[in-house]
Image (cartoon, rainbow, N blue to C red):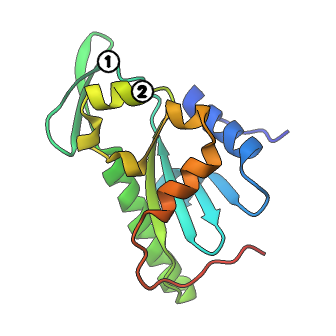
Amino acid sequence: KKNVIFNNESEEFIYRYLEKHLSDKFFFFFFFFVKDRVTDFLILVPEYGFVILEVKGWNGENITKISDNNSIHYMFDDKERESFSPLKQCRDYCFKLNNVIKEKLNLNIFVAPLVCYPNMTEEVYFKKNLDKISSREVTLLKDDFVLDFLENFIRKISSFPRGNFDKVESR
């Protein structure tokens, strides 16, 4: 067993889930550094590229409002706080990783962002208007883990327009 330290139960859940459910052709990294930033998960998808998965442990109950596509307001310790878009955070990681790969390897590899709320149902996601923050197509929810995760995962990443990118092979 690997000695991994998690920031929260949601990250541990996703780590164990990926460990158990992703086939051997996929590779994933937890707490992966990209320049000055740390991603929750980086997943190598052969023939496709990379997926950066940003995990948030929210169940949605403490979210008070979504003011725009960048701000999530929520209650914590009896105070309203603000968090910024996990999708924008994830896209920033994607951009940085893509630039590092271009600089170091001279390859143009597709890097896709996915946001994950493993404790939030689809009903709460829409009720709290989180689709303003990240569309359902780039969001994994609690419901996705009840169904066939790998099918949902592949369906989501294959829906991204890829353009002209180099293929990634696992070795």
Q: Identify the residue under disc 2.
A: 58
**Residue 27 falls in which quadrant of the image?**
bottom right
Task: Between residue 129 and residue 51, name the one nearer to us.
Answer: 129
Q: Position of residue 32 (x, y in %)?
A: 58, 56
Total residue callouts: 2
Q: Position of residue 125 (x, y in %)?
A: 34, 31
Mark 1 secondary-structure assignment: loop
Tell me the residue at 33%/12% (across/down). Answer: 77
Q: Position of residue 56 (x, y in %)?
A: 45, 35
| Residue that sits furthest to the right in the current view | 1
Q: Give residue 152's mark.
A: none
Is 5 on the left or on the right of 34, as rendered? right
Residue 41 makes an appearance in the image: no
Category of crowding for the residue at label 1, using alpha-carbon neighbours closer than 10 angstroms: few (below 14), some (14–19), many (at least 20): few
Q: Give residue 62's mark.
A: 1
Task: Between residue 93 and residue 35, name the one nearer to us.
Answer: 93
Considering only vertical position in the picture, is 63 above or below 152? above
Mark 2 secondary-structure assignment: loop
Task: Between residue 156 and residue 24, name the one nearer to us.
Answer: 156
Category of crowding for the residue at label 2, using alpha-carbon neighbours closer than 10 angstroms: few (below 14), some (14–19), many (at least 20): some
Asked whether disc 1 touches disc 2, contact meaning CB atoms under 8 Å apart, the reply is yes
Tell me the residue at 61%/58% (across/down). Answer: 43
Distance (Cα) linking label 1 and label 2 = 8 Å
